[in-house]
Image (cartoon, helix red, strand yellow):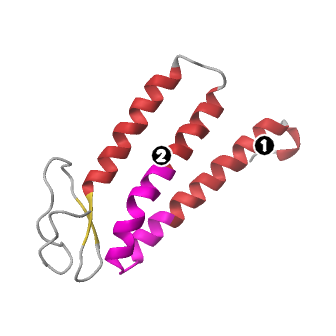
């Protein structure tokens, strides 16, 4: 159990920022998993992906303190995971399902939920 009375102000702010980030990512996950509007998901996916990555990088850099050695490694890692996440997600135009490919180099051709052909040009 965390005793909030003994945390310093910057530690409490970091804890609250981490909780807010986790709730925002959880809300985004719930939206993309449950929404049936494929066109809306296609428009929001790049922005949601970038926002989650940027906020995670900022939170991690803030938590690590003034460590200049960690920044390049963290930014390269976050950029790679962001590109992976962006590339693997597709949205079915028929049922609105989010289809995630296990291989970022090969796009899924059919929806796993309704077997409709997925658009090759859009996420």
Q: Quadrant of residue 44?
A: bottom left
**Residue 49 part of the magenta-drawn span:** yes
Q: Residue at x 23, y 64 (%)?
A: 122
Q: Give residue 39's position: percent from left, percent from top.
A: 33, 75
In this picture, residue 24 sits left or right of residue 11: left
- Magenta region: 28-51
The Cα atoms of the two marked residues, 1 and 2, are separated by: 22 Å
**Residue 107 part of the magenta-drawn span:** no
Query: Few, some or many C-alpha atoms within 10 Å of disc 1 (few <14, some 14-19, many ≥20)?
Result: some
Q: Nearer the viewer, residue 41 or 8?
A: 41
In this picture, residue 4 sits left or right of residue 104: right
Q: Nearer the viewer, mark 1 or mark 2?
A: 2
- Specify the principal SS of the magenta part: helix
Q: Give residue 109's position: percent from left, percent from top.
A: 11, 66
Q: Against 21, is 76 above or below? A: above
Q: Residue at x 50, y 51 (%)?
A: 52
Viewport quadrant of the C terminus:
bottom left
In this picture, residue 102 sits left or right of residue 16: left
Q: Against 41, is 108 above or below? A: above
CB under 8 Å between callouts 1 and 2?
no
Find disc 1 in the rendering and name its residue.
12
Q: Quadrant of residue 62?
A: top right
> Disc 1 or 2, which lies upstream in sequence?
1
Find disc 2 in the rendering and name its residue.
53
Q: Residue at x 47, y 30 (%)?
A: 74
Q: Give residue 120's position: percent from left, percent from top.
A: 14, 64
Residue occupying the far top of the picture: 69
Dot 2 lies on which element?
Answer: helix
Dot 1 lies on which element?
Answer: helix
Q: Residue at x 84, y 35 (%)?
A: 8
Q: Give residue 40's position: percent from left, percent from top.
A: 39, 74
């Amino acid at each position: 159990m965390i005793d909030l009375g003994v945390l310093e102000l910057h530690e409490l702010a970091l804890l609250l920022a981490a909780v807010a980030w986790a709730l925002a990512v959880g809300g985004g996950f719930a939206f993309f998993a449950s929404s049936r509007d494929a066109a809306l998901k296609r428009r929001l996916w790049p922005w949601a992906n970038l926002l989650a990555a940027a906020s995670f990088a900022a939170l991690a850099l803030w938590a690590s303190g003034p460590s200049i050695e960690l920044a390049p490694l963290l930014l390269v890692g976050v950029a790679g995971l962001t590109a992976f996440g962006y590339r693997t997600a597709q949205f079915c135009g028929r049922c609105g399902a989010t289809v995630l490919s296990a291989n970022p180099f090969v796009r899924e051709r059919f929806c796993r939920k309704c077997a409709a052909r997925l658009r090759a040009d859009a996420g």
